[in-house]
Image (spheres, rainbow, N blue to C red):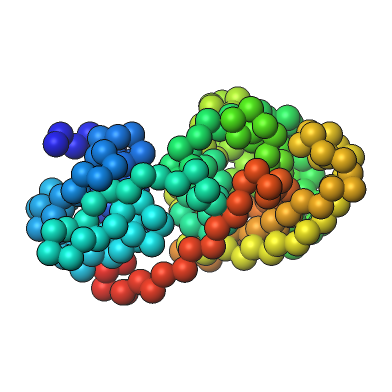
Amino acid sequence: MTVAAAETIERQSPTPYYQQLFDVLERRIASKIIEAGERLPSENELCTEFGLSRATVRQALKLLESRGLAHRIPGRGVFASEPSADKGWLIQGPQGLLENAIGHQNRHVTTQVLRSGPVVLPDSACRSLEVPEGSRGFELVRLRSLDGTPAVYSINYSPPAVAPVVAGAQEVLSGQASLSELLTGAGYGLGGASRIIRAVNPAPEIAQALNVTDSSPLLRIQSTSWTTHGERFDVYETWVRSEIVPLEVNVSTVDPAAAR
């Protein structure tokens, strides 16, 4: 199998090696490079191909199994499973909701940017981003649709230091590229996040965008993200039609030695 440039392990990336390998194998399964029912490369083969330790490879394979993307047959190896249409969108992970929807649900996702530009950040966003009240940042409001049905409405706020990065990203502002990938590439890789979920009735603007009544309960996710150095770089509020998009919380025990 020929490995594309994007399917190498980035040694300087803040993303753990096992997660990078998981992402590569997940893409191969989703794109049918590895067909459902086909055996994945062995641990030794993956160690050689990507220059990783056996512990790191094993961690990536366990994560594939926990996500339902692969299954182990004792004595024979690990085999690709058919991706399930019922998999949720991860609310915590190194990727954003858009990437998880595409990679895990294997369904058509579109993004419409409803509003973007410099703003005076709301006081609540300033507190979460640990910047002075009245600071100017950047606002990005998007609507995500799944198979043509409006499903997710989100508002992202970027602090002053990050605002120019987002303001200059035309593909992100046109809905053609990932904000999470942009920020990671600019040095704002996810080190951690605080996310609060509540069932709420949406404001009229949000209800109209999602094609629901303003008395229809939605799941609202409030999130603050920071880098591995503790720098806060993104605050968002997202409203989710959970009857269309189930949310998933994936918990796994990571061997610290395998994280790199």
Position above or below: 161 against 19: above
| 65 left or right, relative to 188 | left
Q: Looking at the image, which residue is at 84% across and 34% down? A: 208
Q: Residue 96 location in percent, x, y?
A: 53, 47
Q: Quadrant of residue 140?
A: top right
Query: Looking at the rendering, in which quadrant would you find the N terminus?
Result: top left
Position above or below: 38 against 4: below
Q: Looking at the image, which residue is at 29% across and 57% down? A: 71
Q: Of 226 and 72, which appears nearest the observer? A: 72
Q: Residue 79 location in percent, x, y?
A: 23, 51
Residue 104 in view (yes/no): yes
Q: Looking at the image, which residue is at 54% across and 62% down? A: 249
Q: How many labels does the image show?
A: 0
| 169 left or right, relative to 2 | right
| 151 left or right, relative to 48 | right
Q: Residue 141 location in percent, x, y?
A: 71, 37
Q: Looking at the image, which residue is at 16% across and 58% down? A: 77
Query: Looking at the rendering, in which quadrant would you find the C terminus?
Result: bottom left
Q: In which quarter of the image is residue 4?
A: top left
